[in-house]
Image: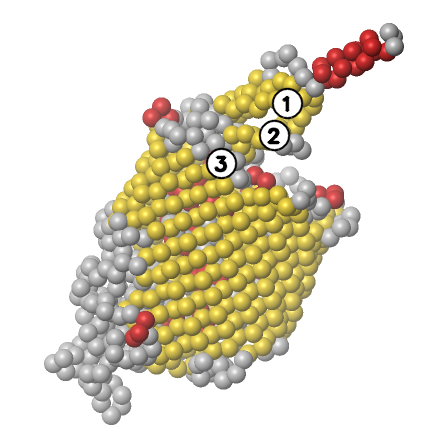
Amino acid sequence: MKILIPILLLLVFNFGYSQEKTSVSGYVWSEKKGITDARVFLIGTKYITETDSLGQFSITNIAEGNYKIQIIAEGFQPLTKNIIVKINANNVLNFELESTENQLDEVVVSGTLKPVKRLENPVPVEIISAAFLKQNPTSNVLDALQNVNGLRPQNNCNVCNTGDIRINGLDGPYTMVTIDGMPIVSALGTVYGLSGIPNAMIDNIEVVKGAASTLYGSEAVGGLINIITKKPFAVPLFTADVFTTSWLETNVDLGYKTNIGSKTTALFGVNYFTYNNPIDNNNDNFTDVSLQNRASFFSKININRAYKKELSLVSRYLYEDRWGGEMQWNKSFRGGDQVYGESIYTSRYEFLGKYELPVAEKMFFQFSVIGHDQNSVYGNSTFLANQKIAFGQFIWDKNWNNHSVLFGTALRYQFYNDNTPATASGNHSKIYSAFAQDEITHNEKISTLIGLRYDYNDNHGSIFTPRFAFKFKPTPTAILRFNFGTGFRIVNLFTEDHQALSGAREVVIQSNLKPETSYNLNLNYLKKFKLTNAGVVNLELASWYTYFTNRIFANYDINPNQIIYDNLNGNSTIFGLSANADWVSPFGLKANLGTSYYDAMTTQDGVNLRPLFTERYSISWGFSYDITNWFLSFDYTGNLTGPMRLPLLSELDPRREISRPYSIQNIQMTFKKIHNLELYTGIKNLLNWTPNRGNPFLIARANDPFDKNVQVNNSGAVIPTADNPFALTFDPTYAYGPNQERRFFIGLRYHFD
């Protein structure tokens, strides 16, 4: 016993010593300034913390040992390092992060379906950061992209304010939307695919301008918008972003992270937007902006599998109740002919997933299942539509010597039905696809990419879509790229063209519409400049040309009372030039400036016409300035949109056929002194511009929306009368810009672990 007691005391002493704990502290900085709210992880442990307003952090109660530390901050490249923690040692560590806004080394996936550094990618991909989205807070991603060069949200109706987004001057249905690379394959993607995703859940957005149908199929004719959500492990436990405006719009974004068991991390988000304050500042007795209640529920689940094989599931449900119309309208008038209103009930669900196969090769399966139900009335006209899409895609990513090869096969099934004469019964269609892509690295400066896609549609037969890209990298900080691609689009007219539904124009479909085909050429030059004591500038120059055959042409000019749809008996072209510059200075100033020029022409039966709603030029900008000592940042964003041709109803129509250039500008101030909390306020539409400037009215015959007093002759043409001197019918499609006047906003962002 005398021998045992000292041994026990020694064991107790050693156990206590082995459990002695210490701490790690440090400083996270970039460009000589501390980084606020950087998240600091000890990978494989429960230890996590954030930097304070000075960029400092501390983790306490840590056992001695070897760890891997990771730093993640919004707007900066993630940093991972191995560290050694010792008892009774000075465990002070400093980390310098590199901004993603002045680097061309960000990894992108949208151009080739492979993770490639932006400066190495043969296909130009533009990155829109989460910091960019904060410069001008909006209630949806659609509006958040208004200051991106070459992108323009389009208002398609002055009553219900349905909109989509245009890329390089092409209509919204030519834009494909994906979430985390998983397709939201439907023509309504740019309308509803960009609404209801909490901005706090978005890590960044990748934009491909130009045909991408070889990899993504139909709808990717004009380009691709890939919304990349944050990884669940890299976000705070709870986030909130709430703002309201002087027009009494209120937007709420909430996010919550949780662990389900030991291997599953889930991220849940809620977006709620409400606006119920009818305003008629242009005095036409119609709401200037549609009223709405929108709720969206978003979730992302990552399952940690053996060998780091990916399994992620994304789901979203959106419900929207939106209406616009005469100021005295309420739901008791819905579908009647006493008071005019356009009322849309939308219910939409999306399930998307990515599963990496448990094999040595890099193989994975992607899928999406989408359901969309729409119940709409436009005055006394009812539009009921139901769309269901199932999509599955298998991809094999393989590297052989200097070849980086991608093989894939896909199946898309679509059901669509509506109550229009164009769809007498439910339509079922299937597209079977196979594609291959090979990027060949010839040397450290030159590579080429070739690709081919084959699609078989049970209605239209075989479709071939080739692709070619050439990359020349003369220096480590410059790249020249040439891309040729073809695109195709199978049209569902009534799911994407709101102008076919609203207003008094009769819809005429001349023939069985054939798939559209496009041919796109794109030349792109990207260069990074390091300025002595002045930061970094990224300069990008591009030129492109797109040629369409079989393009679906909406003709407003033959008969002002009709919209006549047909494949072009001719062709349609668009040529463009663009330039974009980003500058990040070492003294708190960040700036981006972009400009684009468009020359579009449609030839129908030998007659040349400029397409409607295609602007001749655009300019966009954003400036941010941080005053670190005051804990303040200032943002000034804006855009200038050039003239475009607009639809008139008759030769007597007094509205402008060519719009005047207009500019939407915004300012914002953000206060960041309180840890985990940001307060922001500002002004939207600083110049107070609306489309009615220079026009006597926007909505034709707003005083007679059911055309009860319109007189026509024996051929159906409208006759000028004392009550109708311009020979017009009711029509709200003279829409091209936002109808909202200047408004103030105030909001807050908060998060905690």
Q: Residue furthest left?
A: 722
For disc 3, the marked residue is 752
Quick one: 412 or 419, which is closer to the camera? 419
**Figure quadrant of residue 499:** bottom left
* Residue extending furthest toward the top: 2
Where, quadrant-wise, is the N terminus in this rendering? top right
What residue did someone put label 2 on?
Answer: 47
In the rendered image of this protein, does residue 459 appear above or below residue 115? below
- Secondary structure at numbered mark 1: strand
Cβ atoms under marks 2 and 3 closer than 8 Å: no
Q: Is residue 383 left or right of residue 11?
A: left
- Give the CA distance from mark 1 to mark 3: 21 Å
Q: Amino acid at mark 1?
A: Ile
Q: Circle 1 is placed at which residue position?
A: 62
Residue type at the position of mark 3: Phe
Residue situated in front as seen by the camera: 260 or 695: 260
